[in-house]
């Protein structure tokens, strides 16, 4: 019992010191939190389930209706050529305003754009430097370019950091 009380008092004392020292720390300003106005929701055209999920998510997260849109994806394959992806990006150009910070994909099949995942292609823009497997050697994974988002201090300041291929 005495050891438990001592441990509890020690914990309380350390907490008090930490709280006192916290007042000496610099004030860190965090960026505004994301809201529904920062999200673009994409669903697969002619896919009722994809559309239903997109609508449900948008309703729950208060995403404006004009930020829920369909994209045309092939139904017979899970591959897009870079040219097909470029066409989709051109169609989305008016929706990719500086306010959009998140693109949510609501289709169940994984898609590739050339040698990239479609998620990476939306995040970085299509660029073979992000390919883990090179066309010349598909039997092993290779290092890819470092993400421009990784450890990017501009993100903490709320500055726009979208790779140039997406705007």
Image: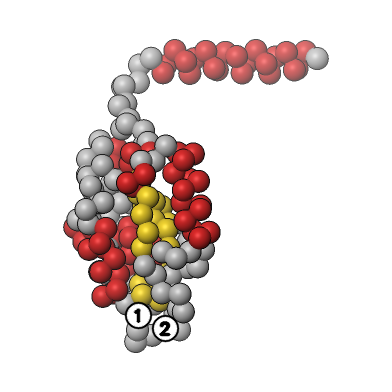
Q: Residue drawn 26% across and 51% down?
A: 95
Which residue occupies the foreground of this view, 157 or 26? Answer: 157
The quarter of the image holding the N terminus is top right
Q: Position of residue 98 (x, y in %)?
A: 22, 45
Mark 1 and mark 2 in contact? Answer it, CB < 8 Å: yes
- Disc marking residue 96: none
Separation of disc 1 and disc 2 at Cα? 6 Å
Give neighbour class at mark 2: few <14, some 14-19, many 20+ (Cα, 10 Å). Answer: few
- Disc marking residue 134: 1
Mark yes or no: residue 142 visible: no
Q: Residue drawn 35% across and 16% down?
A: 24
Secondary structure category for the residue under label 2: loop
Measured along the vertical axis of the image, is residue 68 above or below residue 14?
Answer: below
Compared across the picture, whether 148 is left or right of 109 comes to left
Q: Residue drawn 22% across and 40% down?
A: 159
Instruction: State the scheme by which the image is colored.
Output: secondary structure
Measured along the vertical axis of the image, is residue 101 above or below residue 112?
Answer: above
Q: Residue drawn 38% across and 85% down?
A: 137
Q: Position of residue 28 (x, y in %)?
A: 32, 26
Q: Which residue is mark 2?
A: 138
Quarter assignment of residue 39: top left
Measured along the vertical axis of the image, is residue 161 above or below residue 16?
Answer: below
Farthest residue in the bottom direction?
136
């Amino acid at each position: 019992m005495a050891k438990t009380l001592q441990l509890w008092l020690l914990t309380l004392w350390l907490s008090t010191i930490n709280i006192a020292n916290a007042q000496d720390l610099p004030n860190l300003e965090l960026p505004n939190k994301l809201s529904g106005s920062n999200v673009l929701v994409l669903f697969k055209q002619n896919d009722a389930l994809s559309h239903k999920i997109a609508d449900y998510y948008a309703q729950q997260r208060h995403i404006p209706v004009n930020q829920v849109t369909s994209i045309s994806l092939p139904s017979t394959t899970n591959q897009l050529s870079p040219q097909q992806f470029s066409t989709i990006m051109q169609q989305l150009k008016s929706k990719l305003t500086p306010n959009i910070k998140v693109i949510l994909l609501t289709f169940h099949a994984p898609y590739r754009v050339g040698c990239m995942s479609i998620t990476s292609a939306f995040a970085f823009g299509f660029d073979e430097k992000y390919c883990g497997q090179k066309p010349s050697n598909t039997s092993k994974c290779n290092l890819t370019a470092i993400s421009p988002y990784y450890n990017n201090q501009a993100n903490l300041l709320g500055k726009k950091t979208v790779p140039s291929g997406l705007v």
